[in-house]
Amino acid sequence: MAYSVVLAGPVDIDGWRAAARDAWRAGISPDRLVFHVPGEAGDLFGGEPPPPPRADAAMPLVPRDFLALAEVAVRHRDPARFALLYDVLCRIAGGARGLLDDAADPVVARLRDMAKAVRRDAHKMHAFVRFTEIEGPRHVAWFEPDHYIEEAEAGFFIRRFAQLRWSIATPRLSLHWDGAALSIGPAGRRDALPPPDAGEALWRAYFGAIFNPARLKPAAMRAEMPEKYWKNLPEAQDIPRLIAEAPSRVRAMVAAGAAAPNPNPQRRRTPMATSTEGFAELRAQLLAADLPEWASRATQPVMGEGPVGAALMLVGEQPGDEEDLAGRAFVGPAGRLLNAVLEEAEVPRDALFVTNAVKHFKYTQQGRRRLHQTPDAGDITRYRPFLRAEVALVRPRLVLALGATALRALTGRAMPVTKSRDLHLKTADGMDLRATVHPSYLLRLPDAVAQRAERQRFAADLARAYGEATQTGGAAHAGGGASGANRS
Amino acid sequence: MDLLRKLEILADAAKYDASCASSGTDKRDSRKGGLGSTEGSGICHAYAPDGRCISLLKILLTNACVFDCAYCINRATSNTPRARFTVDEVVQLTLDFYRRNCIEGLFLSSGIIRDPDYTMEQLIRVVRCLRVDHGFKGYIHLKTIPDADPGLLAEAGLHADRLSINIELPQAASLAALAPEKNFADIHTAMGGLRTRIADAKEAKRGERRIRAPRFAPAGQSTQMIIGADASDDATVLGTSVGLYSGYGMRRVYYSAYSPIPDASVALPPRAPPLVREHRLYQADWLLRFYGFSLDEIVAGGEGGMLDLAIDPKLAWALKNRADFPVDVNRAAREMLLRVPGLGAKTVGRILATRRHRGLRVDDLARLGVRLAPALPFLVALDHRPRMLDGAHLRAQLTPAPVQGSLF
Ligand code: SF4
């Protein structure tokens, strides 16, 4: 005599437990009991409902891990799952307490495989559900699981997206979370999904860019992301193209071979003087120093600015009116001219460290205007220690003196700029040095023709200095450009 | 530059970091607010055609870099196009991809701009904004700049799940030659600092200390080594790894076979090493950590300090130690079963549990997940005794046909 039990639904573990308990207590052997899920394929020639349990029959006793296994295995699509579980239940309750440890038992092995497939399906659902935001706002997704996992996995999405409203539709049902409670609705439709949005294009761009064409392993990809999932993954639409293009991309890289170093390498970019300890301390010393009386009339000391470790360091004369107020070097008329000429010379200004030989604005008052006054030899000497300290902090490969004051401050000797312009010089501390005019010299030239010629010459000097400073392995400097304090 | 182009440049620049792990951090979720969850195991939300898992949004804040590491596409003298995200752009991208359920979180790294502190500060601004302003509960892996200020490091560890500093190359001399601004000793010092903080935070959490240490990178630290860019042999590579695992409590040492990059430096070997070398190193790494093999044993399986590329390191060891076999699956101890080719740690666990119930036959072994082809020559079951153990052709028989074709 065969009996049959009709369960409430595909994952009706409670119904199965009650029926299985009763059937066992009624003494029904596994081969005489079938379980039915409405709408699921299976043995349709079911028999009658099983008889009630014998009143004196004990309750079946099972270890906890059997229940854990059953709870997962019932979500499998295999119509035999309930019957297999009943088979194991009967044997365990009949005395084979350790049966689940026997991984070589064919039924146990099959149930374990089913549980494994369900867990994998759940894992893939966590991974491959893709939400799109629609009005509401609500996040909606379409997913096609292999097994009956939707109800069980809703919790994962609730924990993750508790503060959002979302819906996940599948061919069997739909899950809806309104921010407080979960409801289960009817099956969804794939074609009801909203069209792709801008964010999806970004995600696809990321997918394409993070892939390394030199390591093509499509089989490994397919093993973990089987093709059946692709149609619901926006990024997967690009896979055939990425695979097709990979060999030619790699060939191009190999053909291109080793590249020549970029003539304009990356340098520390910074609009303001780096406020590392050294510079802060230097500034503090300058504020406390015993300086000529005129210095106390300046607004503030003006330190250099630019990247520490800059290959090229420009040294001018002293801050002007605007520099004094702003507290920054080369922001006045001469600075603007310098910037323009640097651009003509294709020298990146923010790769340079720019400063002055004298750190305060020396001026004479004339009415409401402050007129620039050239610092004298004594002034230069008073500020020299600060300039030397600054050069030591920046450690450029080459220093370029702009004008006679800077040249004197750096060499310690009075030298005419015009005669030094094409020479390889050294600072008093032995660093590579070149000299050119100060940009304000150009501003003072009365004649437009002379101005144009001088400007060109100035640009050529700047370009040459920058080229020498950044040329790799060049003679400009030994010891490397980057400051030893900077490591990643 | 538009956001899409930036994303392409800055993801492309980040892809040479192999790690995409999102597992092993503390559990949290958004039921009390915020966005996201972590539940222990990582999730791979997609796989790229290179077979790698995509779990995190792996990007650089900027690929501008003032360092000149020869093996790196972002080095100062490379001609690669440069881009830089704003803090807000990274935050919004992370949140948007996360809400789509495309990622577990963020792996953020950066080229060195200005100086270590400045660079580190920029990275921290991103994670602070995600954690504090947006209540982001997803996973964050932050690349750490070795010389950064301790205060910055503390804040990084407060927000990030994992911190990492790349060892880059297996030996000091190689690093000095190829990454002149980096320093092997400094990198180790920084890893040591991370280890101390990670351990303190963990002890505080377990209540083993009276002093409360703040949260610090609960998913620990990892590192990456580039393989094949210098002349180091596998013995050197694995020796360095052993030191990294034991000295600094690394969760993982990633091996990254030097791969052709656009705009390669002239300082590098003209060709990439075979990818299978990287694979063998991972296998050896695994055997060292979970199978009770010593470094000497692993290295002895190969020749001249290099692993055998044709067969996996466990099989290589077994072939050179045939006197230790065959092993009886019905009697041998766990330690010995772990040394049998074709038996994984899980399978060994199942064998031990199952053999209490029955004597194991070959059919049973197949059901337990044993890979029979490599295993049978080395083990005894109720219905099996190997004949080939001393046969000269055993290695040939067990060597798989070469599948690792060269791409060019
Ligand atoms: S520090 Fe070196 S490895 Fe890091 S981004 Fe810069 S060049 Fe690349």
Image: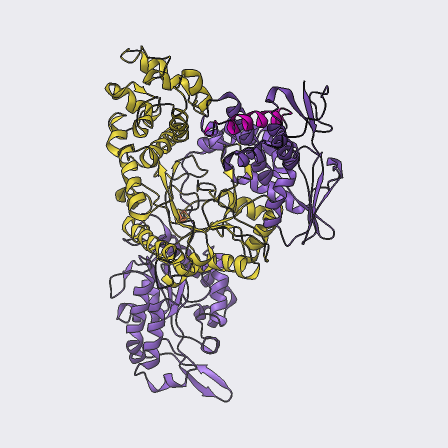
Residue A218 in view, yes or no: no
B137 vs A364: above or below: above
Left or right: A473, with A28 as reference point: left
Q: Is residue A79 magenta?
A: yes
Which part of the image, by quadrant, shows the C terminus of chain B?
top left
Could you say which is closer to the camera, residue B373 or residue A335? Answer: B373
Could you say which is closer to the camera, residue B286 or residue A487? Answer: B286
Q: Is residue A460 magenta?
A: no
The magenta segment: A78-98
Left or right: A434, with B34 as reference point: left
- Can you give x and y, in whole percent of width and height, for residue B178 in the image? 32, 43
At a point 35% along the width and 43% down the height, the residue shown is B168
- The chain letter corresponding to purple is A
At a point 55% along the width and 34% down the height, the residue shown is A119
Residue A58 in view, yes or no: yes
At a point 58% along the width and 33% down the height, the residue shown is A121
- Can you give x and y, in whole percent of width and height, for residue B45 in the image? 56, 40
Q: Colour of chain B?
A: yellow
A434 vs A112: above or below: below
